[in-house]
Image (cartoon, helix red, strand yellow):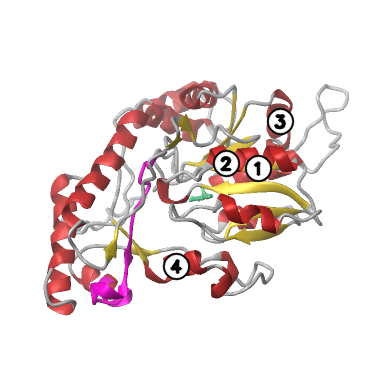
């Protein structure tokens, strides 16, 4: 069998492309030659241990993707039908899906100036059915976790962090993903580190660690006698040793991957700062943003509507994506109000656009995107730029 080679356009700048640091193939080959290709093996062990160490938490459990990770986190906490879980109105759909998988109800809260769940708005959404707060750190900027953790503690709620977009982000120096009972991560191709598909759940709680491992692997009985007796509904959410081999190689360069994202963002900041009508991504004084993607808001003052801008950029070989559609507009989420109830989230959804921002993206590519934005505004938009 021959596999056709992929077409390649050297000038095209995709919104994201995975970056391989060099040892990935070697470690995958090791896993293959040792015969450990499924979900047991030393690559899985090394990846889990290395990831826990990188975050400074006790326990990490590798899983098959980031959606499974957040579902497993909620399931391990016992979130069930009839429960309510608080989430930001503006976020990627996976956390809301995870709540729905549990039979529970997502309750959406508007975001603040960091594009994350607004701590001040959470309390009014808490009812007697609320069991957990599921924070989602959007686009690499962490949510205000010190305040949210205080609130969760005060109200006796579980705290879960979907940290898929914010590996390496910090709040007052503390890493996102270490504030709550449990946190989830994704290693999809566009994330800060990738295993192709893959995810991780981390916790400091030994009891939760046991439950996470157990539910990840079908809830097999714990000894030979009870092995095939399943006391709870489990899942096959296992990470393979092959994926973990890629993860081990990626993890060796975690700091560089984060530094690369931040460097791309700083270049964009510099080159776009003077462009009127373009709101650049936030970075609060208390936060470190890892800029998973470099998102901007194309305000009316920019003069070029977002859709036209995307089209014109694409015609020049530059791919972009609009921001997520908020939960209050999702047909699968029970109705919770309209745009006037979620003004900030609605504004992000209407105006947000993210620019190419891969790990390893070269300065020249960032410059080209920025120059093209300047040129398009001169051509189609406001009088001067
Ligand atoms: C990417 C992402 C996920 C899902 O990860 P997959 O590995 O694609 O399943 C979950 N939550 C957030 C916030 C994400 O950005």
Considering only order in the chain, which callout, 1 or 4, is on the residue closer to the N terminus? 1
Residue linked to disc 3: 208
Q: Is any part of residue 228 visible from this angle? A: yes
**Marks 4/1: CA–CA distance:** 27 Å
Measure the C-alpha gap from mark 3 to mark 1. Answer: 21 Å
How far apart marks 2 and 1 lie (CA) works out to 6 Å
Residue 279 percent location from the top left of the image: 30, 61
Q: In this figure, which residue is indicated by the disc labeled 2?
A: 147
- Whether the residues at callouts 2 and 4 have beta carbons within 8 Å, the answer is no
Location of residue 324 in the rendering, given as x and y in whole percent from the top left corner: 46, 63
Please give the label number shown on residue 349: 4
Q: Is residue 294 covered in magenta?
A: yes
Q: Secondary structure at mark 4?
A: helix
| C-beta proximity under 8 Å, tags 4 and 3 | no
Q: Earlier in the sequence, mark 4 or mark 3?
A: 3
Sooner in the amino-acid sequence: mark 2 or mark 4: 2
Mark 2 nearby-residue class (10 Å; few <14, some 14–19, many ≥20): few
CA neighbours of label 1 inside 10 A, class few (<14), some (14 to 19), many (20+): some
* CB contact under 8 Å: marks 3 and 2: no
> Which quarter of the rendering shows the C terminus?
bottom left
Q: What residue is disc 1 on?
A: 151
């Amino acid at each position: 069998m021959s596999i056709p080679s992929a077409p390649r356009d050297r000038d095209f700048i995709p919104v994201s492309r995975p970056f391989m640091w060099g040892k990935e193939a070697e470690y995958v080959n090791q896993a293959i030659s040792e015969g450990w290709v499924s979900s047991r093996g030393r690559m899985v062990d090394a990846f889990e241990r290395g990831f826990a160490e990188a975050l400074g938490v006790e326990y990490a459990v590798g899983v098959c993707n980031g959606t499974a990770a957040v579902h497993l986190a909620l399931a391990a906490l016992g979130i069930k039908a009839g429960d309510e879980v608080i989430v930001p109105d503006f976020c990627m759909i996976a956390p809301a899906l995870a709540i729905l998988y549990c039979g529970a109800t997502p309750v959406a809260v508007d975001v603040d100036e960091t594009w994350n769940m607004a701590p001040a708005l959470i309390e009014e959404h808490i009812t007697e059915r609320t069991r957990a707060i599921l924070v989602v750190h959007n686009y690499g900027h962490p949510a205000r976790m010190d305040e949210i953790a205080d609130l969760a503690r005060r109200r006796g709620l579980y705290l879960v962090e979907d940290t898929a977009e914010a590996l390496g982000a910090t709040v007052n120096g503390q890493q996102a993903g270490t504030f709550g009972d449990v946190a989830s991560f994704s290693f999809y191709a566009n994330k800060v580190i990738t295993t192709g598909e893959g995810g991780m759940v981390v916790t400091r709680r030994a009891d939760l660690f046991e439950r996470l491992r157990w539910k990840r692997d079908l809830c097999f009985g714990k000894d030979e006698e009870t092995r095939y007796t399943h006391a709870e509904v489990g899942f096959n959410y296992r990470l393979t040793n092959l994926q973990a081999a890629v993860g081990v190689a990626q993890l060796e360069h975690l700091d560089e991957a984060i530094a690369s994202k931040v460097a791309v963002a700083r270049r964009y900041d510099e080159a776009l700062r003077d462009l009127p009508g373009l709101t650049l991504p936030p970075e609060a004084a208390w936060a470190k943003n890892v800029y998973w993607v470099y998102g901007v808001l194309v305000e009316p003052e920019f003069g070029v509507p977002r859709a036209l801008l995307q089209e014109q950029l694409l015609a020049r070989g530059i791919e972009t994506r609009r921001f997520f559609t908020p939960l209050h507009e999702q047909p699968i989420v029970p109705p919770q109000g309209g745009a006037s109830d979620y003004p900030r989230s609605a504004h992000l959804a209407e105006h947000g656009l993210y620019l190419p921002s891969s790990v390893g993206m070269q300065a020249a590519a960032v410059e080209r995107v920025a120059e093209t934005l300047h040129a398009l505004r001169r051509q189609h938009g406001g009088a001067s730029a």
